[in-house]
Amino acid sequence: MNRGLKSVYARRFARTELRRDKVWRVLTRHYFQGWVRPTDAVLDVGAGYCEFINHIQAAQKFALDLNPATQSKAGQDVKVLAQGVTTRWAVPSASIDLVFTSNCLEHLTSKDDLKHCLDEIYRVLRPNGLLMAMGPNIRFCFDVYWDFFDHYLPLSDRSLLEAMELCGFRREKVVPRFLPFTMTGRMPTLSLFVRLYLLLPICWRVLGKQFLIVARKPHGPTS
């Protein structure tokens, strides 16, 4: 399984690593960093090549992924948790301020696995902590959604938000159309163009095929 993950992503991201990293550097600095405080502990679930977690500024940074390549891609200030998301995570309860996940949940093989993942996120988050989830929105990319061999769950902003709320989260922000479907297609890579894209939500409504959901764990007892 580990080797399979490594080969899938090595093939998929061949010759695009530098391009993706440039895009994520801008996305992180000019959008996602606005949700993260310098004192926060941040966990990237399904971190992959660590483009988000390497660039985010935070006091503690963790990358959780079964892919063996994650360890080699992680920055020196990132602690890698080499495990899958469908078992109990090696993260203490109520120890994380923000959990980020991008293009991960659609790879889970069942809704039970999705619920387990959301329950684990809820467990590890501190009260008032945030979950930020991004992924392809089946409502706007149904024609190409299944072009990826490892897509299993068809998720939309509506269905995922409902699942989050059933697990105890409260809606903070929902963007049904955020980024293009892939970063190897119509996503601009020059820093200036990426920044302009972020500043012009009208472009999101035309090119956006991925949702962005921000949900909050309310104050209260943790499991």
Image (tube, grey):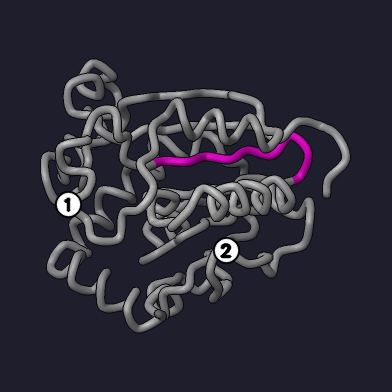
Predominant SS along the magenta part: strand
On screen, residue 30 versus residue 165, left or right, reads: left
Q: Residue furthest top?
A: 202
The residues bearing labels 1 and 2 have C-alpha atoms spaced at a distance of 24 Å
Indicate the secondary structure of the residue bearing disc 2. loop
Number of numbered discs visible in the structure rendering: 2
Rendered location of residue 208, percent (x, y): 24, 29
- Please rate how many residues cluster around mark 1, counting C-alpha atoms within 10 Å: few if below 14, some from 14 to 19, many from 20: few
What's drawn in magenta, residue-wise? Answer: 126-134
- Please rate how many residues cluster around mark 2, counting C-alpha atoms within 10 Å: few if below 14, some from 14 to 19, many from 20: some
Residue 210, numbered circle: none
Q: Indicate yes or no whether the magenta region holds residue 48.
A: no
Residue at point 37% right, 77% down?
A: 69
Image quadrant in which the N terminus is located: bottom left
Say which quarter of the image contains residue 185.
Answer: top left
Instruction: Please tell me whether residue 206 is drawn above or below residue 27 in the rendered image.
Output: above
Say which quarter of the image contains residue 49.
Answer: bottom left
Question: Can you see residue 131?
Answer: yes
Rendered location of residue 174, percent (x, y): 46, 24
Q: What residue type is labelled 1?
A: Asp
Residue that numbered label 1 is attached to: 147
Q: Which residue lies furthest to the bottom in this view?
A: 3
